[in-house]
Image (cartoon, rainbow, N blue to C red):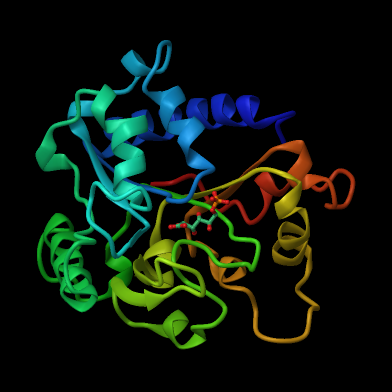
Amino acid sequence: MFRDPAALAEGTAREVIRIVAESLERRGRCALALAGGSTPRELYETLSQEPFLERLDWSRLDLFWGDERCVPPDHPASNYAMAREALLSRVPIPEDRVHRIRGELDPLEAANLYERELRSFAGGALPRLDLLRLDLVLLGLGADGHTASLFPETPDLLGEERLAVPTLAPQTPRNRISLTLPVFNAARTVMFLVQGAGKADVLLAVLEGESLEGPPLPAALVRPRTGRLLWMLDRAAAAKLRRGHDPRSARRGPPSR
Ligand code: 6PG
C-alpha cells in the first residue's frame, strides 16, 4: 500500500503503464476501462504528465468506461467530463479510440449502444459474455460497497447476462449505465483504486468480511476468473486491514495471457 494519495497515483500510474505495454506487446492492442468518481482524477492527471506521458503509446489504446452517469458529456457529474479534463484533453489519443457511454441518451438506449460498441470491439458476435476480455479495468469502491454503478440496492443486476445495463444509484444523478460483473470477471486485470480513511470500513468488509451476514457487496463479487485482481490502496484506506494483509496479492490469477 502507498503512504498517501500522491504516492498511490504515481504507483498506480507505473502499474497501468506496465500492463498497457504488456498488452500492446502481446496482443497488439489494449482495452482499458476507466473508473469514475473522484479518486482516479489524480491518477489520470499523473498519466497525462511526464515522465508517464511519453511512456504510453496512446495511439494504440482503446478507452472505455466502467460506468457513466446519465448526464451530458460536459456535465460536472459526467465521468467522461472528468476524464476529458484530467487526461483526454492532454494526451494524443485518437477520438475513434475513445468509446464513451452516451450519458445524454435514454438510459436503455445508451446501454444498448454501448453494448453494441463493446461487441463490435470484440469482433462482432459474442457467443459468451466472457469472450469480451478487457485488458485492464480500473474500479473505485463506494462507501456502501458498490463499484462502477452496481449498487447493493440493485442485487438483481448482479446476475445480468448483459455487457452493459442501466442502473439506479441511491444518490443523484440516479440514472447510470454500468458494465456488468461478467465483464469485470472476464477481464485480464482488474485494479481497484481506493484511498482515504472514509473507505477503511468498507474495504475491510469487502476484503475480510466474508462472514458478514446478508448478500455479498457488489465489489466483493468482482473476482476475475483467470485474470488478476489488484488493490491499489493508500495507508488510510488500508488502516483496518489485518497487519501484513497485502491485498494486492489477493486472488492473483495466472499472468494475463
Ligand atoms: C461513479 C463510480 C463509482 C466510484 C465510487 C468511488 O461513477 O461514481 O464509478 O463506482 O468509483 O463511488 O467514488 P470516489 O472515488 O468519488 O470515492
What's the residue at 78%, 64% (across, down)?
A: 208
Above or below, comparing residue 217 to residue 12 in the picture: below
220 sits to left or right of 58 = right
* Residue found farthest to the right: 243
The image shows residue 55, relative to residue 192, as above or below, that is: above
* Number of marks in the rendered image: 0
The residue under the point 22% across, 51% down is: 100
**Image spot of residue 30 (x, y percent):** 28, 40
Question: Vertical placement of 240 versus 234: above or below?
Answer: below
Is residue 76 shown to the viewer in this render? yes
Q: Is residue 22 rendered to the left or right of residue 237?
A: left
11 or 129: nearer the viewer: 11
On the image, the x and y values in percent for residue 136 come to 40, 46
Report the side of 151 relative to 167 (left or right): right
Quarter of the image where the N terminus is located: top right
Q: Is residue 189 visible?
A: no
The residue positioned 18% from the left and 58% from the top of the image is 122
Which quarter of the picture shows residue 98? Answer: top left
Residue nearer the viewer, 105 or 60: 105
In depth, the one of 134 and 169 nearer the eye is 169
Q: Residue furthest top?
A: 51
Q: Residue at x 20, y 76 (%)?
A: 127
Q: Position of residue 43 (x, y in %)?
A: 48, 32
Q: Position of residue 152 (x, y in %)?
A: 57, 78
